[in-house]
Amino acid sequence: MKRSDRRRFESEFKTILKKFGDNCSICKMPLQHNVKTFGGVTIENKTALTADCCKEKLVSILREGVYLTKNFDSIPNFPPQSHKVLDVENPSEIVNSIQAYFDKLEGVAENLMARAGVTSSRHEVCVSDNAWKSDDAEWFKNNPSRSHRLRRVFVDELSALPKDITQREMSNEYRLDILVRQISPGQRARLPIWLYSAIDVPDDEAVIHAIFDLASKKGRVSEITLDEIQKMAKEYGVSQRLN
């Protein structure tokens, strides 16, 4: 490829990634999480971003990558345990390593969600150290008889939550809280929930257990009503009435 053609490709490919990077440039289908992507030019000499769906329509492949949609907060160096400059002559090996890493994380997440009783297919994995993980770990350490916690959301935690939850238009009567279920020390599931702020939720294991189960139901909206909490909490052995 001529140097001028290469410069044109680089410029056009950056624009595609910035403005249209969520879809295949050729068939326009949305890219799926953890698929291998390819940047190149078509027989018509058009710059394109694609996946396996239209890879064969590229006459020249100049870029390879991985498309990620889930909010995994840590991408390790590749190759593992190495700080060497990546071999740009063989990007497929690096891309395969990234895919394998996220496949493993996905398997871990699905296993944890199943153990936590969360049936929703949407989940994110937080593997890096942060303030809310440390706070939850300390809280459960100090409360060994508890498996559930209801707390306020951390400001820095908002960016790690689904945007359709955090950006939801809610009245001032609701506040965004976090439900936490400890599966085992160091392994916890979090659920964001819009809670009616007038509800005085007691710091009671059965009550918060009930709220977590309500919020974790598949297809469940993020608001939980007082009547629902009272009904399930009663089933879980709580006789006191919530206010």
Image (cartoon, rainbow, N blue to C red):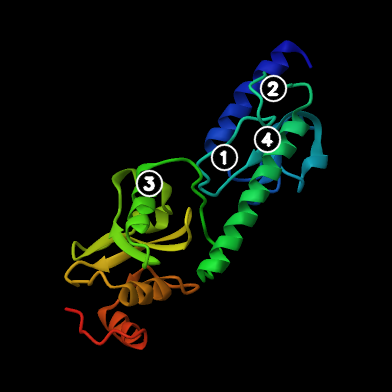
Q: Give the label, 1 or 4, closer to the camera.
A: 4
Mark 1 vs mark 2, CA separation in Å: 26 Å
Comparing 2 with 126, the one in front is 126
Few, some or many C-alpha atoms within 10 Å of disc 4 (few <14, some 14-19, many ≥20)?
Answer: some
Q: Which mark is residue 7?
A: none
Secondary structure at badge 3 equals helix
| Residue 60 horizontal side relative to residue 46, left or right | right
First in residue order: circle 3 vs circle 2: 2
Residue placed under numbered mark 4 in the picture: 65
Q: Quadrant of the C terminus?
A: bottom left
Q: Hey, what amino acid is under mark 3? A: Ser
Residue placed under numbered mark 2 in the picture: 86
First in residue order: circle 2 vs circle 4: 4
Q: Quadrant of the N terminus?
A: top right
Q: Hey, what amino acid is under mark 2? A: Leu
First in residue order: circle 1 vs circle 3: 1
Mark 4 vs mark 3, CA separation in Å: 33 Å
